[in-house]
Amino acid sequence: MQGFLTEKLMKSKQPLWSRISKAIRPSSRHIGLDIGSRMIKIVQLQHDLDGWQLTDVRVKAISFDTDDPRTKNNESCPPEMLRQVIRDMGLEGASVAIAISGPSVIMKPLDMPWMSDDELAGHLEWEVERYLPYEREDVYWDYFVPERPQRDRSSAMRVYLVAAKKDMVDQRVGLVKEAGFVPVVVDLDCVALANMHALNVSGFVEAPELVINVGPSGLNIITVGGGEYFAMRDATLGGDWSLDLLKESVPYLKNGEAGVNGRYFETAGDNVELEDVCREILYEVRRAIDDCHSCEGGQMVQQVWISGGYAHLPGLVASLSSHLHVPVNIIDPFRNINCTAMEGKEDKRSALSSVAAVAVGLALRCNHGQ
């Protein structure tokens, strides 16, 4: 699947699921770059006749300069920090897939009369402002359609409209260009998770499953499987949680190779804080499950997969499982990827796998813009 907004930077009209399952051309380098609120994650894959191979994975903790207006509010990472990682990996000038998420991104389901692809594209080109809370000139937008009811043209069809504020997209693209990458795909964090899930969890599933990326700033949640129903949710965690929680959740960040500034994890979290974080995560996941069940013809969520910087928080999986009464597991984004190129670095790959899910999903679709 090409990024939702890539072709509004180059508009694409392919439906979501056909884009997810679209054949990938062999390419020597597929790079996914996930810039989070606390860490930079870069995954480099190679694809050939034998499938996907992992060639490198890097994680760099972001240390913010409070005197720099770009970073004092944790709005972005310093471009020089990203540039250094790019140099260390020898990726200057490489094509890369990036993602966006947060309150400036919206997805709106629309129930519309059946129409052809051309009719739908024409309708949205003229009428998109009716469906968006923003002015047309302020956003990039795209849409996708799940399995369409081609057999019955009298039936309604569901269309998902996605839009993102231009200033936020342009800021992220500009940062990546300034650092030395060439962004060729702009996607959504949630859709990158769906692509990663499709590769590693037996393709598409009939019953709904949740895939969640949970980090210090919030959650990205996407519902996969279960027919036409599709939902994504970006939720912000309300507390100013201790960064020490992230250190405990990603043990590999304790050593210097991951680029952790010693001052970055100054404050130790306590049990009260940990309980508060788990409670907020549970609340948002339960809302996503309830939304899925309450939709027309909705089914119960059968599985929850979690990833991200907080995936290994002590007690999180057990707490979610006991309160939600569904299986909850940490997903391995490298499960169906050949990792022989990382021989001798198994501990590093394993420790970083939980934070690499979005970057893996992005790398799967980075095909030099094709």
Image (cartoon, grey):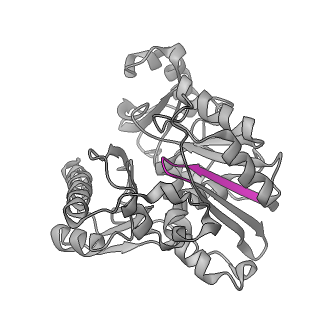
Vertical side of 130 occupied by 369: above or below: below
Location of residue 305 in the rendering, given as x and y in whole percent from the top left corner: 38, 67
- Magenta residues, as a range? 29-39
In reply to whether residue 219 is colored magenta, the answer given is: no
Identify whether 71 is placed above or below 27: above
Q: Residue at x 22, y 47 (%)?
A: 296
Q: For the point 36% across and 63% down, which residue is it?
A: 245
Let me know if residue 112 appears in the view. yes
x and y, in percent, of residue 38 in the image:
49, 51
> Where residue 297 appears, x then y in whole percent?
23, 53
Q: How many marks?
A: 0
Residue at (55, 23) in percent of width and height: 167
Residue at the location (71% across, 79% down)? 342
Q: Position of residue 40 (x, y in %)?
A: 59, 53
**Residue 140 visible in the current orientation:** no
Q: Where is residue 319, by image quadrant? A: bottom left
Closer to the camera, 199 or 335?
335
Q: Is residue 100 above or below residue 305?
A: above
Name the main secondary structure of what is drawn in magenta: strand
Residue at the far left in the pictured view: 323
Is 360 on the left or on the right of 73, as rendered? right
Judge by depth and name the residue closer to the eye, 260 or 40.
Answer: 260
Q: Along the horizontal axis of the image, is 145 left or right of 206?
A: right
From the viewer's perspective, tell me whether residue 266 is left or right of residue 63. left
Residue placed furthest toward the bottom = 344
**Closer to us: 220 or 132:** 220
Asked if 235 appears above or below 263 in the picture, the reply is: above
Residue 30 located within the stretch drawn in magenta: yes
